[in-house]
Image: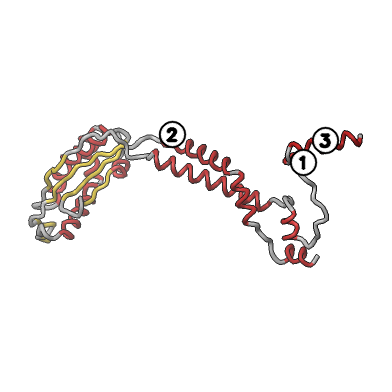
Amino acid sequence: MEKQERNQGEYYSIDMLHILKSLWRRAWLIALVGLLAAAIGFSIAAFAIAPTYSSSIMLYVNNSSFSLGNTSFSISSSEITAAQSLVKTYGEILNNRTTLERVIERAGISYTYKQLSKMISAAPSNETEIMRVTVKAGDPYEAAKIANCIAEVLPIRISEIIDGASMEVVDSAIPILEKVAPSITNYTAVGMILGILLAAIILVIAAVMDDTIHDEDYVLQNYDYPILAKVPNLLTTSTKQYAYYQSGRSAKN
């Protein structure tokens, strides 16, 4: 009784071996849930989420001397940090409402300037003086069209704001038919991992909450009771022994 009271009063013991055995016995169920979750992830990525395509243009940022208001700047082509700062400045001008409205008008699209701003990203290309502008849209041809309209509008817009500044198109945009999102591989893999984890967690909780006495070791480890007898499982014994048991019962009857 002392051991029983100690186990129930002071702590709750968890049999890790029992949990591992439970997981191993139901490994097929874990694998099945993982496959079903992977199929769900694949279906969501392939059919439920609209695909996104991207197209990019590359613009050379002219680093010659120019003036902004009453302040003059002189940027050397060797000053990469300054060139990157200039690209960031041009990126802010690109995402300006006036610039985006001009792009919308030239491209003949029905987006608002806020919607278009979320579709556009600009950054230096490999830490150089070349600015890469990427447009993401639900149609590859529309993405390329918007990007090329930016290549037409942005240099004019910058020359209106910054005296002496100029940009040259290095590479125009072309439609790219390979979608950039969603990734079917990622969705499938994440679905499988989540399915396996969810099934394993549920089985672990079920094993921890299971207070059924499975064998004599459970009694010896958790209670201070002696084992007086053990009832054999006749369904798992050999055919000969089971036949002997049946014939014994018939003889007694």
Percent of width and height locating residue 161: 15, 50
Q: Is residue 38 above or below residue 201?
A: above
Q: Nearer the viewer, residue 226 or 73?
A: 226
Check contact, mark 2 vs mark 3: CB within 8 A: no
- Which disc number belongs to residue 246? 3
Check contact, mark 1 vs mark 2: CB within 8 A: no
**What is the secondary structure assignment of the residue under circle 3?**
helix
Percent of width and height locating residue 13: 67, 61
Residue shown at 10% from the left, 57% from the top: 77
- Which disc number belongs to residue 203? none
Q: Which residue, as the protein is rendered here, is positioned at the far right?
A: 253
Q: Nearer the viewer, residue 109 or 80?
A: 80
**What is the secondary structure assignment of the residue under circle 1?**
helix
The residue that label 1 is drawn on is: 234
Give the Cα separation between the discs numbered 3 and 1: 10 Å
Q: Earlier in the sequence, mark 2 or mark 3?
A: 2
Residue shown at 22% from the left, 39% from the top: 147
Q: Earlier in the sequence, mark 1 or mark 2?
A: 2
Q: Earlier in the sequence, mark 3 or mark 1?
A: 1
- Which three-letter amino acid code belongs to the residue tagged 2? Ala
Which quadrant of the view contains residue 112?
top left
Q: Nearer the viewer, mark 2 or mark 3?
A: 3
Q: Is residue 9 left or right of residue 106?
A: right
Residue shown at 74% from the left, 51% from the top: 213
Give the Cα separation between the discs numbered 2 and 3: 61 Å
- Which three-letter amino acid code belongs to the residue tagged 1? Leu
Percent of width and height locating residue 82: 16, 59
The residue that label 2 is drawn on is: 48
> Pointer 3: residues within 10 angstroms few (<14), some, or many (20+)?
few
